[in-house]
Amino acid sequence: MITDKNLAYQILKDKISLLSRGIVVQPRKWWIPIRHRQSYAGGPGPQGRVYYISYGEESPTVGMISIPVYPKNHYLAKYAISTKRSKVNPHNLITENSIVLKSLPPPPSLRMNLSDGTSIGRNVLFRMHCYNTYAISPSLTCYHFEDGKQCKYCTIDIPASSKWKLPKVFSDEHLVEALEITLQNYKIRSITITGGTFPDPDTSLCNMLNLIKKIRKVTDLSIHVQFEPVSELGLLKELARFANSVGIFLEILDEKIRKEICPGKSKVPKEKYIEAWKEAVKQFGQGNVLTTCFLGFNENLETTLQEIEKCVKLGVRVVILLVRPGSQALGKNFIPSYLGKEDELIDFHIKVAQILLKYKLDTKIGGASGCIGCLGCSAIMEACQYARLS
């Protein structure tokens, strides 16, 4: 636990710099190109390459990060932080300002097969996020893509999924067996389940509920579940019997920007999200309901703070995410509005942390299930760490 206020501020500053700018990595071999990993393996959120953060190769780690990685010819490389490979361990990176990013070895189970020969890693049956968070995506489906109204920041690669012959929906049996094998070979802190986007969120949640019941037969690890607002709120009471927290993501709190950036999802009115949040807080408790707040679209930060406080007053945690360019819908040369404004970002994160502290919803590493106890893709946990010392 960090007790030095100056160190806490430095950690917050460095994580915001890394998250907002990303890093440029030189390949280990000249003939092996660096793949653009701003959103590792594709996805709507900012899951990137996972590293431990340290201030020296022999120093203890001060946190973890899911960081965007750009090749040197990417148009955002000029904003990114340059790195060199460690001479002690070539898997580790040393940034231009001497931060050491220590690579996280993948779980052995990613190289294993299921009993029927299905490759666990090849079929993307799970991903490991920061702080031993095991992430399952039972489905790679988003029906907004079919209408051409997907969230503009989303980098899900539907054509690649077809090329790799990945199923649109993974079987519960495969998901559970992959989890069991990983549990035998790797320490897992908690599980996050996010189920894709379907025309009927109620049916989607029922399907996830069936999966969770099967998972409960093999582990008592905490479970965090992400889904869109449901019409039958009674489903949340049933879900609370098996899961520990939920994420119901509004994504963008400014309604005008939300309609522009999330043309499909924004058809669900904000009022329905609020209704779902209130019932979820009733069933799961204060602080066990999460929503995201993406930045980078020229939003008004003061207005955004006001909207965040409205959410937090309801007992809903808010996680700040920085949009990561990479989707065709944003345009080939989209520049996030936060680039070059790190001081503003730091101040904003501290103010959000103060709101969370005010309503006793601040967050700590491993302090809750799934994403809520991870937040490697956000600096809000570090902001809370600093705010507690201020």
Image (spheres, helix red, strand yellow):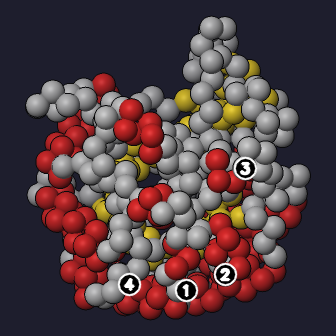
Q: Nearer the viewer, residue 243 or 169?
A: 169
- Visible residue check, residue 65: no
Q: Is residue 79 above or below residue 7?
A: above
Q: Which mark is residue 255?
A: 2
Quadrant location, the N terminus: bottom right
Q: Residue at x 45, y 28 (%)?
A: 105
Q: Nearer the viewer, residue 320 or 37?
A: 37
Residue 289 vs residue 358: left or right? left
Give the mark, 1 or 3, whose residue is nearer the N terminus.
1
Q: Secondary structure at mark 4?
A: helix
**CA separation, marks 1 and 4?**
15 Å
Identity, as a three-letter code, of the amino acid under mark 2:
Glu
**CA separation, marks 2 and 3?**
21 Å
Q: Which residue is mark 3?
A: 331
What is the x, y in percent for residue 379? Answer: 66, 58
Q: Which residue is mark 1?
A: 270
Q: Secondary structure at mark 2?
A: helix
Q: Assess disc 2: are there few (<14), some (14-19) or many (≥20) residues with their C-alpha within 10 Å of its C-alpha.
A: some
Do tag 1 and tag 2 residues touch (Cβ < 8 Å)? Answer: yes
Q: Which residue is mark 4?
A: 280
Q: Assess disc 4: are there few (<14), some (14-19) or many (≥20) residues with their C-alpha within 10 Å of its C-alpha.
A: many
Identity, as a three-letter code, of the amino acid under mark 1:
Lys
Give the mark, 2 or 4, whose residue is nearer the N terminus.
2
